[in-house]
Image (tube, helix red, strand yellow):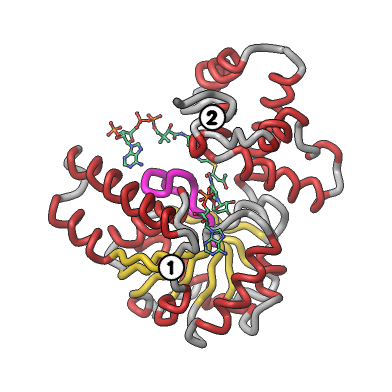
């Protein structure tokens, strides 16, 4: 693979969306030495993001995995804004807003107008076509998927997704950036769900079917998968961590993208989302956290 000469070109990172993924990505970038602008349309989300980053950094410091000075420097490198235009000087902008193609496309077209001509626009989407997100911009060769896993400060993987027009140079820059963040990279072609969610989400959906059809209790389903297959969390607990709305949106992308009934979302998953039982972030999902 050709060597990139661009290692030091990326110094300012913009992150759009300050929810559980965006705040974690901003934390990883700041701890890795980048200046970070974190944007969310909701000021309350930015407050929650700063509290989450501070608490997570505090946990790393108290375990001796990060020095107090490095933690405090990272907090100083993180700036929050509800004005998208503040991201105009970013070298790379990583989008982590709601998993909706329409909403993401609108954002990408705004970012295309705001960002420098050289800026790379990356998406943390779990499943949506990078090629389609890129098509609404004037720079499809500079649009790429940079898919962090939840929780970003702890999970080692970044799945890089190349759209139909993503250039080799942009791929190499994002691979280099991911490695500077201490992550290990895999590369996926641009098909629904990429690698991780193509395999993980049907398993989670099947766990909902197993519960829905009364095969076992939620606790026994999760215990079976934790102790029976050595997964760190059971599939229903993991769905609560990811967010049931995110899981449902990914299943819809798989179902629509492949047109195969095996990806049809479980009615119980749909019902929980309809009821606002979105998982840990709402205090209730499959389990209650109150
Ligand atoms: N910040 C800093 N440290 C944290 C932390 C945080 N946010 N959360 C947990 N930790 C630390 C704890 O302090 C603890 O550290 P030590 O091991 O040094 O004591 C360690 O992490 C374990 O914490 P917990 O005991 O609270 O929890 P755990 O043992 O269950 O580990 C976990 C947490 C890493 C999340 C683990 O349960 C796990 O790996 N779960 C599976 C996660 C997973 O599969 N993620 C991918 C989801 S799919 C995806 O992301 C893609 C998509 O598009 C949907
Ligand atoms: P979340 O609901 O926790 O956060 C989304 C944030 O985006 C919210 O704070 C919201 O206010 C903000 N937002 C919405 N529209 C916006 C806009 N137009 N401009 C600026 N901010 C906006 O969601 P999340 O779980 O962090 O997921 C974000 C993205 O990351 C999704 O694409 C999701 O598929 C992907 N992802 C999620 C996980 C996961 O486990 N949750 C893992 C990997 C990837």
Q: In x, y percent, where is residue 198? A: 68, 45
Image quadrant assignment for residue 131: bottom right
Tags 2 and 1 touching, CB below 8 Å: no
Judge by depth and name the residue closer to the eye, 174 or 138: 138
User: Residue farthest to the bottom?
Assistant: 117
Q: In x, y percent, where is residue 176? A: 42, 67
Image quadrant assignment for residue 274: top right
Label 2 sits on a secondary structure element that is loop
SS assignment for the magenta stretch, majority: loop
**Residue placed at 31% from the left, 68% from the top?**
34
**Residue placed at 49% from the left, 85% from the top?**
118
Question: Horizontally, is 175 left or right of 47 in the view?
Answer: right
Q: Quadrant of ligand 1?
A: top left
Q: Which residues are magenta?
A: 146-158
Looking at the image, residue 34 lies above or below residue 152: below
Looking at the image, residue 34 lies above or below residue 112: above
Label 1 sits on a secondary structure element that is loop
**According to the image, label 1 marks what residue?**
82
Judge by depth and name the residue closer to the eye, 22 or 262: 22
Question: Horizontally, is 173 left or right of 68 in the view?
Answer: right
**Residue placed at 54% from the left, 29% from the top?**
284
Question: Which sits earlier in the primary sequence, circle 2 or circle 1?
Answer: 1
Q: In x, y percent, where is residue 55? A: 28, 44
Residue 284's disc is 2
């Amino acid at each position: 693979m050709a060597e990139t000469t661009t290692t030091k070109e990326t110094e300012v990172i913009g992150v759009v969306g300050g929810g559980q993924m965006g705040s974690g990505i901003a934390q990883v970038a700041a701890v890795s030495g980048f200046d970070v602008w974190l944007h969310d349309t909701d000021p309350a989300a930015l407050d929650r993001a700063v509290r989450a980053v501070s608490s997570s950094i505090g946990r790393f410091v108290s375990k001796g995995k990060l020095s107090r000075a490095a933690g405090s420097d990272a907090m100083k490198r993180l700036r929050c804004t509800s004005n998208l235009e503040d991201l105009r000087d970013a070298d790379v902008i990583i989008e982590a807003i709601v998993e909706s193609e329409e909403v993401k496309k609108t954002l990408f077209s705004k970012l295309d107008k705001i960002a420098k001509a050289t800026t790379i626009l990356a998406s943390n989407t779990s499943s949506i076509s990078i090629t389609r997100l890129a098509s609404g911009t004037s720079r499809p060769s500079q649009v790429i998927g940079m898919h962090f896993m939840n929780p970003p400060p702890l999970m080692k993987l970044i799945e890089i997704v190349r759209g139909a027009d993503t250039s080799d140079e942009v791929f190499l820059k994002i691979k280099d950036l991911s490695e500077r963040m201490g992550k290990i990279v895999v590369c996926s072609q641009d098909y629904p769900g990429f690698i991780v969610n193509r395999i993980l989400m049907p398993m989670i959906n099947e766990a909902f079917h197993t519960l829905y059809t009364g095969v076992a209790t939620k606790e026994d389903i999760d215990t079976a998968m934790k102790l029976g297959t050595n997964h760190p969390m059971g599939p229903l607990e993991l769905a609560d961590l990811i967010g049931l709305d995110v899981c449902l949106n990914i299943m819809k992308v798989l179902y629509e993208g492949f047109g195969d009934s095996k990806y049809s979302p479980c009615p119980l998953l749909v019902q929980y989302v309809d009821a606002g039982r979105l998982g840990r972030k709402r205090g209730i999902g499959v389990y209650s956290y109150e």
